[in-house]
Amino acid sequence: DIKRITAPDIRARKGGEPIVSLTAYHTHTARLADRHCDFLLVGDSLGMVMHGMQSTVPVTLDMMILQGRAVMRGSQRALVVVDMPFGSYEGSKEVAFDNAVRIMKETECGAIKLEGGRRMAETIAFLSERGIPVIAHVGLTPQAINTLGSFKAQGRSETEWDIIENDAKATAEAGAFAVVLEAVAEPLAVRITQNVAIPTIGIGASSACDGQILVLEDMLGLSDRVPKFVKKFAEIGPSIDAAVEAYAKEVRARSFPATEHTYAMRKKS
Ligand code: KIV
Ligand code: NA
């Protein structure tokens, strides 16, 4: 049995070798990403990526738990972190605790993630003091799309800097073991990484962060539209298209299945 990376292991990597992370929603992708990542995030982005939703707002706790279980089955080494979906933690720290406990009991994951800085500090403290490791998420917080109006980069004017930096600091002081910085202007990401005691995990926040995360399907070139901060490390869409096209052609030509894919009768003894 391989020992899993823990939340304290990730916390201890502040200022050290960069922390590598990707999202995973399924057993098969978890198995592949587990070989190279320090933690896997079962992100609520699955609502958009797997289900074609317009935002992460409709994602439910049951959806997160189902995919969290799939990712735990596919991985052995990486810490698995499950996103708390919109509506499952904002109401009160007690509601957040009950729902985080459900996630941890039903998936056996090692940590949860939630969006918000100062406004979530009390909840982060309540959870982390009660055995639930928390990653915070500040900068662009996609669950707030309906109050933000659009997905846009944060901290591009210095007047926003203190708000975002204080959000990140508050999560660290409350006991979060890492903080995701999403779509944050590079100089602000540098400053937060220098001034906050816990690892910063960047997504669209520059290489200054203590670690990086991307949505797996985005970096594989499987998503239709991706933000500027996504680098496509592969373009697997065209390979899938070519494979499906070849399959369809062979089925129509009756050249697939061939004899080697076919069962013959048992020989009579
Ligand atoms: O849901 C998600 O994929 C995330 C990211 C940080 C990538 O929250
Ligand atoms: Na998310």
Image (cartoon, rainbow, N blue to C red):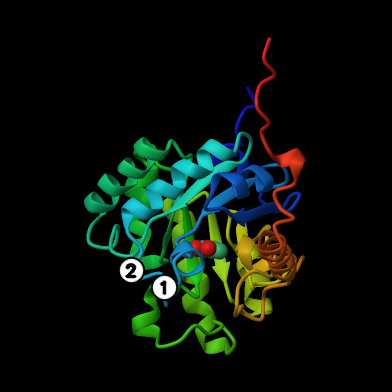
Quarter assignment of residue 194: bottom right
Q: Which residue lies furthest to the top in this view?
A: 269
Secondary structure under badge 2?
loop
For the residue pair 237 and 148, the one nearer the viewer reads as 237
**Residue 187, position in %: x, y?**
68, 78
Amino acid type, label 2: Pro
Residue 37 seen in render: yes
Amino acid type, label 1: Met
Residue 214 seen in render: no
- Residue, x 68% and y 77% (percent of image)? 186
Q: Which mark is residue 165?
A: none
Task: Describe residue 47's horizontal placement relative to residue 211 as left or right.
Answer: left
Quarter assignment of residue 269: top right
Q: Is residue 49 shown above or below 41? A: below
Quarter assignment of residue 268: top right
Mark 2 → mark 1, Cα distance in angstroms: 8 Å
**Residue 6, position in %: x, y?**
57, 37
Crowding at dot 2, Cα within 10 Å, few <14 / some 14-19 / many 20+, comes out as: some
**Would you name the residue on which mark 1 appears?**
53
Q: Are dots 2 and 1 in contact, CB under 8 Å?
A: yes
Quadrant (top left, top right, bottom left, bottom right) of the N terminus: top right
**Would you name the residue on which mark 2 appears?**
58
Which badge, 2 or 1, comes first in the chain's sequence?
Answer: 1
**Residue 103, position in %: x, y?**
36, 44
For the residue pair 242 and 34, the one nearer the viewer reads as 242
Task: Describe residue 163's horizontal placement relative to residue 209 as left or right.
Answer: left
Secondary structure under badge 1?
loop
- Residue, x 62% and y 27% (percent of image)? 3
Task: Describe residue 194's horizontal placement relative to residue 176 as left or right.
Answer: right
For the residue pair 16 and 91, the one nearer the viewer reads as 91
